[in-house]
């Protein structure tokens, strides 16, 4: 049975975004708690949306690079594998409404200031997801940075979007 890498990757990203966990020089840090931010694995319906929100959207996936000759040997001749490096792209959407607030170091962060905080720390969390406890061997990560940042005055929502590419070994 093949390993379900795509669901492993997606679940790990969502779990880490929910906890806000990232690495620091002293170990690990937490940007927010699960009660502070709502993370969705897909776009929620309008009545289910809670702010501030992080929405992960798998946008693409496919073969990044095939192994030369389609065969790879690890150490001895009886551990040969066939496969490729496989990539997956996620769009990460952040949304903050006028009523959103998170207390950071005793100070309330709201509106654009909260969006800025979420952008930086979402990037930290995404780049530091640890896959060592899974069967997925990640070989590359690319974070494109947040773009399409803006404010919708009719909805009173600040939002931003980034893309995140993760490449892993897909041995068969």
Image: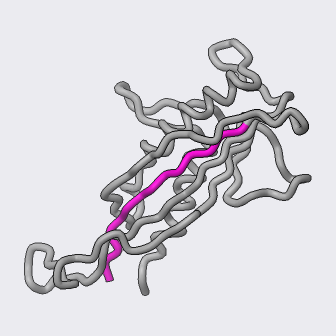
Horizontal side of 170 relative to 120 (left or right) equals left
- Observer-nearest residue: 160 or 11? 160
Image coords of residue 79 (percent x, y): 17, 81
Q: Position of residue 46 (x, y in %)?
A: 88, 53
Q: Is residue 24 above or below residue 162?
A: above
| Residue in the picture at 36% in, 55% down | 132
> Is residue 171 one of those drawn in magenta?
yes
Q: Is residue 64 visible?
A: yes
Quarter that holds the N terminus: bottom left
Q: Image height check: is 68 above or below 119?
A: below
Question: Does residue 35 appear anywhere in the picture?
Answer: no
Residue located at (70% from left, 60% from top): 42
Q: Residue furthest top?
A: 106
Seen from the viewer's position, the closer of residues 152 and 95 is 152
Number of marks in the rendered image: 0
**Main SS of residues in magenta:** strand
114 drawn magenta: no
Horizontally, residue 47 falls left or right of residue 7, namely right
Q: 99 or 74: nearer the eye?
A: 99
Image quarter (top left, top right, bottom left or bottom right) of the C terminus: bottom left
Specify the segment rendered in magenta: 159-172
- The residue that appears at 38% across and 65% down in the rendered structure is 136
Tell me if 91 is positioned left or right of 141 in this view: right
Q: In this picture, is 66 found above or below 55?
A: below
- Rendering coords of residue 70 (x, y %): 22, 84
Residue 73: image location, x then y, percent:
14, 78
Image quarter of residue 169: bottom left
Residue at 58% from the left image edge and 64% from the top image edge: 59
């Amino acid at each position: 049975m093949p390993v379900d890498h795509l669901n492993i990757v997606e679940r790990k990203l969502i779990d880490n975004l929910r906890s806000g966990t990232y690495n620091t020089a002293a170990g690990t840090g937490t940007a927010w708690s699960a009660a502070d931010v709502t993370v969705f694995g897909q776009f929620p319906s309008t009545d289910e949306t809670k702010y501030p929100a992080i929405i992960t959207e798998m946008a693409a996936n496919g073969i990044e690079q095939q192994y030369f000759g389609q065969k790879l040997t690890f150490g001895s001749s009886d551990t040969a594998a066939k496969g490729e490096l496989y990539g997956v792209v996620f769009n990460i959407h952040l949304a903050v409404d006028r009523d959103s607030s998170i207390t950071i170091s005793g100070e309330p962060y709201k509106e654009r200031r909260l969006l800025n905080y979420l952008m930086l720390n979402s990037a930290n969390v995404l780049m530091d997801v640890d896959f060592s406890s899974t069967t997925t061997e990640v070989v590359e990560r690319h974070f494109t940075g947040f773009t399409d940042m803006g404010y919708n005055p009719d909805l009173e929502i600040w939002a931003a979007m980034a893309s995140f590419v993760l490449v892993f070994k897909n041995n068969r």
